[in-house]
C-alpha cells in the first residue's frame, strides 16, 4: 500500500469514527434503558417471543458476549421476580442430575426443556457433557424434532424462530439446499401449517376476510396464528396498522369486536 492509499484509508477510518461518535442513540444502552423501565413499571419478564428477551439474557448471563454486571445488579434489584427460576447454573446442575439418574429428557415446552435447548445451542462444553451423560436425550434427534414440529403445526402454533433449535431444524428439513432436506416432511408440514410458509400481510388479511365472510369465530390468541397479526393490523398505534382493513373486518365480523 503506497502513502496515498494509506492516507485515504486513514481518512476513511476517521470519518467512520466521527460518524459513530455522532450517533444520538447507543443501541445497547437504549435496550438496557427499555428493560429497566419495564422493571420499574412492574411489567412481567419479557418472554421468548419478546424482542428484548434475548437482549436481557445476553446482558445478564456471565458467559454472554454482552454481559454487564452493573446492569444485572440494577435489573435484579428492580425486578427480582424476573430471575426466580432463571439461574443458569442451577438449571444446568439440575439437568446434569437428571441426566445422571437416567431420567427422560425434559419436554421442550416445559421450562427446563426450553433451558436445555438454549444451553446446548450456546454452550458447547455443556452440550458435550450432557450428551455423554444422557445419550438417549439425543438419540434420533431428527425424528424427535419432526415429531414436535408436526405437533406444533397441528395445534396451529406459530412457526418456531430460526434462532432456536426447532427453528433451525425446520429450516434444514424444508430447504432444498439444507443438509437434512426431507421432501415428504416438507409436503406434510406445509399442509398442516401453510402459514409457516406464507406469512405475508396480504395473505393473512385475505384469510381473515374469508373467515369473517364465512361467519367463523374470531381467532383466539394462543390457538390461532392469525389472532396476533390481526391485532397489529387493527391497532391504530401498531406499526402495521391498516385503516382500510380495520374498517372492512369490523364491518364483516362485528361479533368479533363485541366486549
Image (cartoon, rainbow, N blue to C red):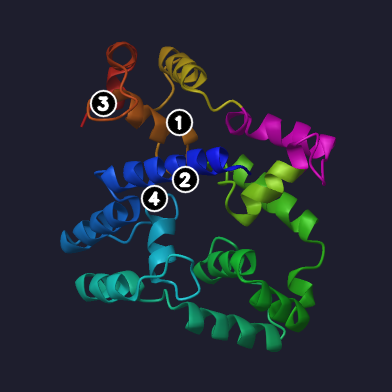
Q: Position of residue 242 (x, y in %)?
A: 32, 18
Q: Position of residue 64 (x, y in %)?
A: 48, 69
Q: Quadrant of residue 182?
A: top right
Residue hosting label 2: 10
Q: Are marks 3 and 1 in contact (CB under 8 Å)?
A: no
- The magenta stretch spans residue 46: no
As helix, strand or loop, the secondary structure at mark 2 comes to helix
Q: Quadrant of the C terminus?
A: top left
Residue 159 left/right relative to 186:
left
Q: Are marks 2 and 4 in contact (CB under 8 Å)?
A: no
- Residue 226 has which mark? 1
Q: Which residues are magenta?
A: 173-197
For the residues marked 3 and 4, what is the alpha-carbon distance in whole angstroms?
A: 26 Å
Which circle, 3 or 2, is nearer the viewer? 2
N-term mark: 2 or 4: 2
Q: Tell which residue pokes out farthest to the front in this image.
A: 3
Which circle, 1 or 4, is nearer the viewer? 4
For the residues marked 3 and 1, what is the alpha-carbon distance in whole angstroms?
A: 15 Å
Q: Are marks 1 and 2 in contact (CB under 8 Å)?
A: no
Q: Position of residue 76 (x, y in %)?
A: 27, 74
- From the viewer's perspective, is residue 113 above or below residue 237? below
Task: Characterize the magenta stretch by its predominant secondary structure.
Answer: helix
> Measuring 74% from the left and 50% from the top, which residue is drawn there?
146
Q: Residues within 10 Å of mark 4 (few under 14, many from 20)?
A: few
N-term mark: 1 or 4: 4
Q: Quadrant of residue 233?
A: top left
Residue hosting label 4: 50
Amino acid at each position: 500500500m503506497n502513502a496515498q492509499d494509506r492516507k485515504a484509508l486513514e481518512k476513511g477510518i476517521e470519518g467512520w469514527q466521527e460518524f459513530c461518535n455522532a450517533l444520538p442513540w447507543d443501541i445497547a444502552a437504549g435496550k438496557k434503558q427499555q428493560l429497566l423501565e419495564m422493571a420499574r413499571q412492574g411489567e412481567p419478564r419479557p418472554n421468548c417471543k419478546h424482542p428484548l428477551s434475548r437482549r436481557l439474557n445476553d446482558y445478564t448471563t456471565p458467559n454472554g458476549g454482552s454481559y454487564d454486571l452493573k446492569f444485572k445488579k440494577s435489573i435484579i434489584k428492580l425486578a427480582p421476580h424476573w430471575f426466580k427460576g432463571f439461574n443458569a447454573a442451577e438449571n444446568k446442575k439440575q439437568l446434569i442430575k437428571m441426566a445422571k439418574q437416567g431420567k427422560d429428557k425434559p419436554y421442550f415446552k416445559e421450562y427446563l426443556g426450553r433451558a436445555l435447548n438454549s444451553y446446548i445451542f450456546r454452550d458447547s462444553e455443556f452440550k458435550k457433557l450432557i450428551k455423554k451423560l444422557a445419550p438417549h436425550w439425543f438419540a434420533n434427534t431428527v425424528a424427535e424434532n419432526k415429531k414436535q414440529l408436526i405437533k406444533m403445526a397441528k395445534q396451529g402454533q406459530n412457526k418456531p424462530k430460526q434462532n432456536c433449535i426447532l427453528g433451525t431444524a425446520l429450516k434444514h428439513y424444508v430447504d432444498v439446499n439444507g443438509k437434512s432436506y426431507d421432501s415428504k416432511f416438507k409436503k406434510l408440514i406445509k399442509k398442516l401449517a401453510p402459514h409457516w410458509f406464507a406469512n405475508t400481510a396480504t395473505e393473512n388479511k385475505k384469510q381473515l376476510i374469508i373467515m369473517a365472510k364465512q361467519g367463523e369465530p374470531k381467532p383466539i390468541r394462543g390457538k390461532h396464528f392469525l389472532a396476533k397479526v390481526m391485532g397489529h393490523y387493527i391497532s391504530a398505534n401498531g406499526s402495521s396498522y391498516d385503516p382500510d382493513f380495520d374498517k372492512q373486518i369490523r364491518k364483516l365480523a362485528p361479533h368479533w369486536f363485541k366486549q
